[in-house]
């Protein structure tokens, strides 16, 4: 467990679980799916009042300094109930601003840490070439022009953390979305509860935060947080499917006694444990700033995509026809699994990133086979 050896994290998990179970009820969650780009403002307000946006922020910047472990714990809890909050994007924006060492961002840091302002992570191009590999968005004289594909919380964000190309070098930039030259477009999606929108920039002011190294770190942390969110969602599917298989009877016995269902549940468990192990390794590497942090984060993200995708799909199958009805909960996890699998780029782009990072650290020597 992430809170092992930390009383603070254990208390925060208990607090988060109580609050989410109280607010993120099935009826509340279903109400967020009706319209495109819906944002859960009541839940965000509760999270702000509890201080969640500043959980991973260093004490020197006014935060609680519980690090990426604390943020990952909150991602687990939101993933368990399919709640959507911009905790990760705000934390990454704060981290990037601190790394940039620009004193003019002090007020913005306070706003993001308190939750008064919202940031979105808009790193993907419509062509999905892979985050950090290239970018169709370009920088000219400090202004950004280009487009970014559907990004979570872009519809309600005040700022966008985005990647852009400046003379052949892809870097990380911060764009104020309230200025002229920016446009957001809401698009109906399989999961409308993410406040997602595509972004278009036309000569909008963009503040440079860092080069490829910072962009790679931001990408890896995002992959890690997404992995914990997906693994927790997969666990919820396993619990849901197991409970239903014990209660539902057919031919005079619980359907969980049938071998076909046992195999599905066992496979869910195996994929979840593999994904969780990968996520823990990636977290340890990021906390220690290990050289293999990028490859481990990519592996964790890919393992989590596989675990959540399989668990959400098979949970639907276990529930049968009832699983796809509006009243049932399995479709919430299926929607979220499909969304998170693509939100940071396609699995193929992450496979390419993984092999590239491994190859960079372990180049083949002459004469090796």
Image (cartoon, rainbow, N blue to C red):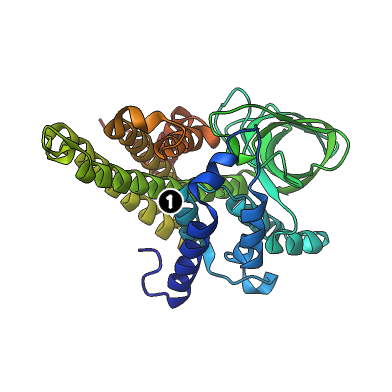
Image x and y of residue 12, in percent? 49, 69
Image x and y of residue 135, in percent? 65, 30
* Farthest bottom residue in view: 7
Q: Residue at x 38, y 51 (%)?
A: 279
- Circle 1: element type: helix
Q: Which residue is mark 1?
A: 80
Along the horizontal axis of the image, is 230 left or right of 274?
A: right
Image x and y of residue 323, in percent? 36, 33
Along the horizontal axis of the image, is 180 left or right of 235?
A: right
Quadrant the N terminus occupies: bottom left
9, 244: nearer the viewer: 244
Along the horizontal axis of the image, is 317 left or right of 297?
A: left
* Farthest top residue in view: 127
Q: Residue at x 42, y 40 (%)?
A: 329
| Residue 261 visible in the current orientation | yes
255, 122: nearer the viewer: 255
Q: Residue at x 11, y 36 (%)?
A: 252
């Amino acid at each position: 467990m992430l809170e092992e050896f930390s009383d603070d994290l254990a208390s925060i998990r208990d607090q988060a679980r109580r609050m989410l179970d109280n607010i993120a009820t099935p009826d509340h969650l279903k109400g967020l799916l009706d319209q495109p780009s819906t944002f859960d403002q009541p839940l965000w307000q509760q999270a702000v009042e509890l201080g969640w946006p500043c959980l991973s922020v260093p004490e020197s910047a006014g935060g609680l300094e519980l690090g990426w472990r604390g943020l990952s714990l909150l991602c687990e809890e939101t993933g368990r109930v399919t709640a959507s909050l911009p905790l990760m994007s705000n934390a990454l924006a704060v981290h990037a601003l601190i790394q940039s060492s620009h004193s003019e961002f002090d007020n913005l840091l306070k706003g993001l840490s308190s939750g008064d302002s919202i940031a979105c992570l808009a790193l993907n191009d419509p062509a999905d070439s892979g985050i950090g590999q290239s970018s169709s968005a370009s920088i000219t004289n400090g202004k950004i022009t280009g487009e970014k594909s559907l990004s979570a919380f872009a519809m309600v964000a005040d700022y966008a953390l985005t990647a852009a190309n400046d003379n052949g070098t892809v870097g990380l930039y911060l764009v104020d979305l309230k200025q002229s030259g920016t446009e957001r477009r809401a698009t109906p999606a399989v999961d409308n509860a993410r406040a997602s929108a595509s972004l278009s920039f036309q000569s909008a002011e963009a503040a440079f935060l860092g080069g490829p190294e910072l962009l790679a770190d931001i990408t890896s942390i995002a992959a890690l947080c997404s992995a914990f969110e997906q693994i927790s969602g997969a666990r919820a599917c396993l619990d849901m499917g197991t409970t239903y298989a014990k209660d539902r009877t057919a031919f005079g016995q619980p359907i969980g006694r049938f071998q076909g269902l046992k195999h599905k549940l066992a496979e869910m468990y195996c994929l979840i444990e593999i994904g969780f192990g990968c996520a823990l390794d990636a977290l340890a590497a990021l906390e220690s700033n290990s050289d293999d942090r990028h490859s481990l984060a990519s592996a964790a993200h890919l393992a989590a995509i596989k675990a959540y995708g399989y668990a959400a799909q098979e949970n639907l199958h276990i529930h049968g026809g009832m699983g796809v009805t509006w009243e049932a909960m399995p479709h919430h996890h299926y929607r979220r699994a499909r969304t998170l699998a693509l939100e940071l780029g396609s699995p193929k782009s992450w496979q390419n990133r993984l092999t590239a990072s491994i190859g960079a650290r372990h180049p083949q020597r002459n004469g090796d086979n």
